């Protein structure tokens, strides 16, 4: 399951269209950004909290968007 889909706002702002080619890289960037609390294969409550915290904090949102833009 791709928990990163909850971050569609950041993906849109970064201009990233998730494709089969870049999906793993997008997944890796968001997992690293969210941190160790994110468990691969399971969308935990920490992901929901992280999404809210990132979207509610312009600086954190810009940091994530900047990292996502590296996907190109």
Image (cartoon, helix red, strand yellow):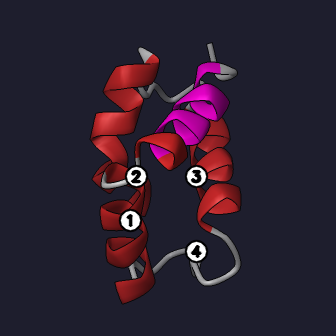
Please tell me whether mark 1 or mark 4 is closer to you in this view. Answer: 1
* Residue drawn at x 42%, y 56% as measured from the top left: 54
* Residue drawn at x 32%, y 74% as measured from the top left: 48
Q: Is residue 40 visible to us here?
A: yes
Please tell me whether mark 2 or mark 3 is closer to you in this view. Answer: 2
Query: Of helix, strand and loop, which one carries label 3?
Result: helix
- Of residue 8 and residue 1, the one placed in the foreground of this image is 8
Q: Which residue is mark 4?
A: 40
Say whether disc 1 or disc 4 marks the residue closer to the N-terminus.
4
- Of residue 57 and residue 47, the one placed in the foreground of this image is 57
Say whether disc 2 or disc 3 marks the residue closer to the N-terminus.
3
Does residue 3 belong to the magenta stretch? Answer: no
Say whether disc 4 or disc 3 marks the residue closer to the N-terminus.
3
Q: Which residue is mark 2?
A: 57
Q: Relative to residue 45, is residue 36 drawn left or right?
A: right
Q: Which residue is mark 1?
A: 53
Q: Image height check: is 3 above or below 19?
A: below
């Amino acid at each position: 399951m791709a928990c990163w889909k909850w971050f569609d706002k950041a993906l849109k702002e970064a201009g990233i269209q998730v494709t089969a080619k870049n999906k793993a890289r997008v997944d890796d960037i968001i997992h690293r950004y969210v941190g160790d609390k994110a468990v691969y294969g399971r969308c935990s409550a920490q992901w929901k909290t992280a999404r809210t915290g990132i979207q509610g904090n312009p600086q954190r949102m810009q940091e994530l968007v900047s990292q996502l833009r590296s996907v190109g």
